[in-house]
Every structure is written in C-alpha cells, then in structure tokens.
Amino acid sequence: DTAVSQTPKYLVTQMGNDKSIKCEQNLGHDTMYWYKQDSKKFLKIMFSYNNKELIINETVPNRFSPKSPDKAHLNLHINSLELGDSAVYFCASSQGDRPSGNTIYFGEGSWLTVV
Amino acid sequence: GENVEQHPSTLSVQEGDSAVIKCTYSDSASNYFPWYKQELGKRPQLIIDIRSNVGEKKDQRIAVTLNKTAKHFSLHITETQPEDSAVYFCAASYNYGQNFVFGPGTRLSVLP
C-alpha cells in the first residue's frame, strides 16, 4: 500500500562498484524525482521526470543515470561509486500540474554507504 | 534559479512555547510554498502548504504566513510538544510544483 516505494532501503558497497536503486509510485502521478540528502540533511534535487521525459537534470555527475520505463517507475543507476556518493537518496512523486499546488510524496529513502 | 534560505538552522524551545522558522526565496515567480517535517530516520512529510494568492493558512497548532512583497514565508508552531522535535524544511516552487527547491532545514528540539 506504500504510495512511493524504493528498494533497497540500505546499501553498503565498495568504491568503484555499480549499483541501482529502484522506485515505484502507485499514486498515478505524472512527475517523479530523485533527491539526495547528505550528512548535513540538505535536500538537493538530482533529476525530475514528467511522463517518462527528463525535465530537470541538476549538476550531477554523469555516473548517475536515471531511467524511467513508464511514468510509475524511476530508477537510479550509479556507476563507479565514490565515497562522496554516500547519502540518503529519496525518490518522490507529485501530480505536477494541479493549480492548487502539488504535494511531493517521498519514498522511505535508500541509505547508500560507499566504503 | 530559485534560492531558498532558512533560519534558524537549529532551534530549541521549552514544551508549550511557540516556535517560528523563517524562509526567504529569490524567484518572484515562485507561487507554491510547502513545509515538510522529517523525523529522525524517516522521510520528509508535508505538514502545511500555502499558495501565493493567500497570506496566511492555519491548521490546528501550525500556521504559515507569506509575504510576497518581501519574498519570505514563516512556519509558526504553537504549544509545542516533544513530538514536534524534527527537522523542518521549507520549499518554494513555481508553476505550482513543477520544480521544488528546498531550504537547508531547521532542527527543532522541544525540551520537556
């Protein structure tokens, strides 16, 4: 029943590895996001997709590649992991076009630790 | 692009007192301002939001005010309780939510 679900919740991996985080939303929303939250708790947007199309791509290393097979899924693949990639990654979704305001719903987060 | 500042970064209040967190934004086109609460180890969750055509909104012990001219908005929590302890994020977006920019967060501690 979880509205925005992401897996895995915890991920510990070595430097140089490649890993993926999956996200699915069952809210029927058109827009999905990936946010990165670092140790200082800053929430920074990484990517935003609307109906499977990339609409926001902030300054993120190209080792990070999002993929949206359909509007209910937005996965994040990370190549050649570095120590600085350690963070909590939140997937989120919103309706994206409601004039009354569009609440962002966050997933539970994926705690990535690179050792 | 939009830039959102938030103050204070940490705030400690006695239980029962009020807490106020202030945010400023830079883009006059921003028109939607939500506030999120993030408890330790949990996801951020919406607690209240306000649109640019409204100056104030209240929901029980929580209220938000917006000053479009000055480009700042504030979160007010009255009669604080220990369960209000969390990190609070303000955000600003234009087009009613196509692109959210979050403030750096305020860690609120309510002391018993």
Image (cartoon, coloured by chain):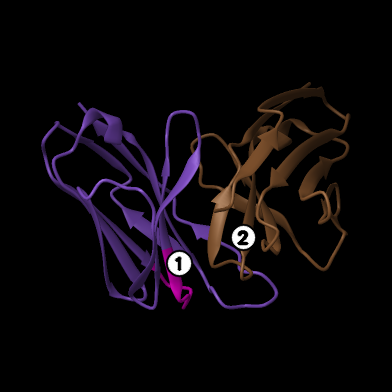
Chain colours: A purple, B brown
Q: Which mark is residue B83?
A: none
Report the Cα–Cα distance between label 2 and label 1: 28 Å
Query: In the displayed structure, does residue B58 sit left or right of residue A32?
Result: right
Q: Position of residue B110 (x, y in %)?
A: 75, 26
Q: Looking at the figure, which quarter contains the C terminus of chain A? A: top left
- Residue corresponding to mark 1: A1
Q: Nearer the viewer, mark 2 or mark 1?
A: 2
Q: In which chain is the residue bearing label 1?
A: A
Q: Position of residue B63 (x, y in %)?
A: 84, 50
Q: Which residues are drawn in magenta?
A: A25-32
- Residue corresponding to mark 2: B93
Q: Is residue A76 above or below residue A87?
A: below
Q: In which chain is the residue bearing label 2?
A: B
Task: Using a 10 Å C-alpha cutoff, classify the residue at mark 1 as few (fewer than 14 neighbours), some (14 to 19) or many (20 or more).
Answer: few
Query: In the displayed structure, does residue B43 sit left or right of residue B33?
Result: left
Q: For the point 61% across and 42% down, which residue is it? A: B103
Q: Is residue A14 above or below residue A93?
A: above
Q: Is residue A97 magenta?
A: no
Query: In the displayed structure, does residue B85 sit left or right of residue B81?
Result: left
Q: For the point 46% across and 78% down, which residue is it? A: A28
Q: Name the amino acid type tagged 1.
A: Asp
Res. A101 image quadrant? bottom right
Q: Position of residue A20 (x, y in %)?
A: 21, 52
Q: Name the amino acid type tagged 2.
A: Ser
Residue B70 vs residue B21, the one in the foreground: B70
Q: Secondary structure at mark 1?
A: loop
Q: For the point 77% across and 50% down, which residue is it? A: B71
